[in-house]
Image: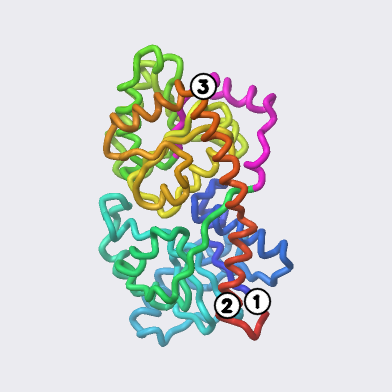
Amino acid sequence: MRIGLSTSVLEPARTAGRLDGMGVYTQHLLNGLKERQQQVVPLSFPKRGDGGRLSVGQSFGVPFPVAALGGVFSGGFWRQNPKVDVYHATDYRVLPMRCPVVATLYDAIPMVDPSMANPRFRQLKNALMRKLASYADAVIAISSYSVAELVEHYRVDESRIRVIHCGVDKVWLTDPDPAFVGQILPRYGLTPGYFLAVGTLQPRKNFTRVIEAHALLPQEVRREHPLVVVGKPGWRCENLIETLKHKEAQGEVRWLSDVGERAELRALYYGASTFVFPSLYEGFGLPVLEAFASGIPVVTSNTTSLPEVSAGIAWEVDPTSATDIAEAMLKSLVDEDERQTRIAAGRERVRLMSWDKTVEETLGVYRELSPMSV
């Protein structure tokens, strides 16, 4: 079976070497399919004028907006022909094809609450995404929570949806070299024991309330356990950046906007006392599993997909209450028995959530759509 896999999100010219969530998902699928001796055809859309800069996938020949609008305005008559048995769009770039199409739709955030998404051309993007989703023969949701929202907002028939969870990279299951951690933390001006929050600076990540919650802790706790925020600027974050800079000047918060390799991020997890992730909305919430794998307790939200990921192992709180977040942060420090119980349960949880399982279940979807090509 020839499997076409969208790889635009892996192109170095676009990612600057830093993969987002879709990139991590796509990279693990690509690697896992190749490890299983599957015939994978990586396919990328060029940006206007940079077709020669593609280095991961073969070029579709036309930029995605051109292909998408052509497909929509022709009523699906203009179909791409990647010459594969099944095509998997892992990046919302779904198109009418001359083969079965699988689409991974991570969430419906832009439609559920447009204020949580990049506002640029949002109405047009939502309408286009909804129409393009109709060209998928099968849709993969990364959490059970997402299914109802995909049905409502993308108008996908539930019978076409398969729930396949994300996984944790095997590298997270082994503790990093303490000597390496000992080199990385001082490089960022850190000592072990801080609260850690990770994510792009944008409204739904709820960093403002995390900062408010940290400020509610006793002064001695704040001094011994500063808040470290790791994340690049996103959208609608101007006020947040000002707050981060102000708190940094007070010595209680550190903002790291440009952490380098993933190994360094693992070291930052490993040096933390508690991971704080009370996001307002997540289609899955992979950082929760990465924190579990790193052997640190987690404070997360009791909403959207996060309880499904946490399975009761994290302190699950109301993400709209800075007081609730602060109380859980404090508990994670002072109740050592509960802390160790949750750490052990978290490590068990991640052993059930592997990318190998994700790849195998995804292969099963391909075989459903193209059984004669197995």
Residue under label 2: 86
Q: Which mark is drawn over residue 193?
A: 3
Residue sticking out furthest to the top: 220
Find out whether residue 171 is within the magenta segment: yes
Q: Which mark is drawn over residue 158?
A: none
Looking at the image, is mark 3 or mark 2 earlier in the sequence?
Answer: 2
Under mark 3, the amino acid is Gly
* Residues marked 3 and 1 touching at CB (< 8 Å): no
Mark 3 residue element? loop
Name the quadrant of the C terminus: bottom right
Looking at the image, is mark 2 or mark 1 earlier in the sequence?
Answer: 1
Mark 2 residue element? strand
* Residues marked 2 and 1 touching at CB (< 8 Å): yes
Q: Which mark is drawn over residue 2?
A: 1
* Real-space CA distance between mark 3 and mark 1, rounded to the nearest whole angstrom: 49 Å
The part of the chain drawn in magenta is: 170-198
Find out whether residue 372 is within the magenta segment: no
Image-quadrant location for residue 31: bottom right
Determine whether, in the image, residue 164 is placed left or right of residue 158.
right
* Real-space CA distance between mark 3 and mark 2, rounded to the nearest whole angstrom: 48 Å
